[in-house]
Amino acid sequence: MTWTLIIVLSLGAYALKAAGLVGVGVRDFPAPVRNVIALVPAAVLSALIAKDTFTNGQDLQIDARAVGVAVACLAVWRRVPLWLVIVLACAATGTVRAIS
Amino acid sequence: MGRAKPSSKATDDWSGIIGPALGLGFAVFAFGLSFGVLCIDAGGTVPKAMAMSLFVFTGASQFSAVGVIAAGGSAISAAAGALILASRNAVYGVAVAPSLRGSVPYRLFASQFTIDETTGMTLAQDTPARSRRAYWVTAASIYVFWNLATLIGAVAGSNIDTERYGLDVAFAAAFVGMLAPLVRSSRARRVASAGAVVCIATTPFVPIGVGIIIAALAALVGLCRGTEPTTAGSTGGRA
C-alpha cells in the first residue's frame, strides 16, 4: 500500500470518470466499447469473489471464508439489506473459526 | 438500490431524492467501515486509507486494490485490476452527462462523483432538474458517509483482529451484493461464471492479482453480436 499506488489509482479513477462526463459527454462511446465495459464488472466482481473465497496467495484453499460467502449469497438472494449481508457473512466466518 | 420513487407532485421537487440518498449513504457506511479496517490490516495507515476514499472514491476498485495488496500481490497488478473495474465509471459519465450540462470546470468537478449510486439515482428521475438535483444530493450523501466510515474503520482498525471476527470476508460479501443486480441477463451470468472460473484456474500459475486481470477478458464477449447487453443505464451495482 504505497503512496505511489494511491496516487496512480486516484488519477486513474478520476481520469476514467472525467473521460465519460467531460471527454465523451453527451455523445456516446461506440457500441462495442460500451458493451464490453458494461460486462467488465460482472467478470471482475465474480473473479474477486472467487479470489477472496478460495485463494490464499497462489494456493487454492477451502476454509471458513467459504461459509461466510455462502451466507452472503443466501442473504443477497433473500434481499437482505447490504450492510446486514456483510455483518452476517463476517459473523458466519467468525463463528466457524471460533468453533473449529 | 439506486432507484428513487418519482414524485407524484411536480411541485415537491425534493421528495424521493433526499430519503433514498440518505438511505444509500447509510448503506455504504458498512462498506466504508470494512474498507477502513481492512486497509489498515493490509499494511495501510489512516492517512492512506483516507486518501483512497477521498480521492479514488469508487468503492469496488478500492476494495479490489486493497484485497490484492493484502494477498501479497504487486502494486502494478493491484492498480491494473482496480482501474479495469473503474472503467465502468466512464460509461456512467456518459449516462449522466445530459443531466449535468454546464461549463468544463463544473463538469470536471462533477466527474469525481460519477459512481454507481449517483448514476442510479440520476437516471431514476423523471425531469432534468430532478436528475441534476439527485446527482448532487446523492454525491454529497455518499461522499460524507463513505469518508466518515473509512475514518472510523481505519482508526479502529489497528485494534481489531480481523480474522477472529471474520472481517476478511467483508469484501467478498460486498462483492456478492454488488454483483447480484448486474447478472440479470444470461449473457452477464455467463461472463460472471467465466470470470470466476478463469480466476481460480489461473491463480496457482500467475502472480497474485493477475488472475483478476485475465478474468476481465471474459467481458470481451461483449464484442460479439447477440442479445444487446444492458447498457450504461443499468446501474444496479454499488460504489
Image (spheres, rainbow, N blue to C red):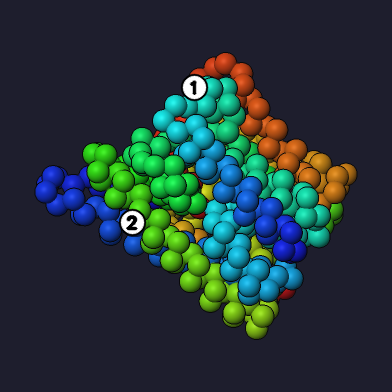
Vertical placement of residue B96 versus B140, above or below: above
Q: Please give the name of the residue rendered at 49% of the width and 56% of the height, measured from the top-left corner.
A: A75
Q: Residue lying farthest top?
A: B225
Q: Are marks 2 and 1 on the same chain?
A: yes
Specify few, some or many for label 2: CA neighbours under 10 Å numbering under 14, 14-19, or 20 or more. Answer: many
Please state if B94 lies on the left or on the right of B68 as rendered.
left
Q: Please give the name of the residue rendered at 74% of the width and 59% of the height, measured from the top-left corner.
A: A4
Q: Please give the name of the residue rendered at 52% of the width and 49% of the height, measured from the top-left corner.
A: B178
Kindly identify which residue carries mark 1. Answer: B228
Residue situated in front as seen by the camera: B69 or B226? B69
Q: Quarter of the image containing the C terminus of chain A?
A: bottom right
The kind of secondary structure element at disc 2 is helix
Identity, as a three-letter code, of the amino acid under mark 1: Glu
Vertical placement of residue B217 versus B23, above or below: above
For residue B45, what is the image quadrant? bottom right
Q: Residue lying farthest right?
A: B205
Residue B233 screen position, x and y as percent: 42, 35
Q: Earlier in the sequence, mark 2 or mark 1?
A: 2
Q: CA distance from mark 2 to mark 1?
A: 32 Å
Specify few, some or many for label 1: CA neighbours under 10 Å numbering under 14, 14-19, or 20 or more. Answer: few
* Number of marks in picture: 2
Residue B219 screen position, x and y as percent: 64, 31
Q: Please give the name of the residue rendered at 63% of the width and 39% of the height, measured from the top-left corner.
A: A43
Residue A51 screen position, x and y as percent: 72, 51
Kindly identify which residue carries mark 2. Answer: B137
Identity, as a three-letter code, of the amino acid under mark 2: Val
Please state if A23 lies on the left or on the right of B83 as rendered.
left
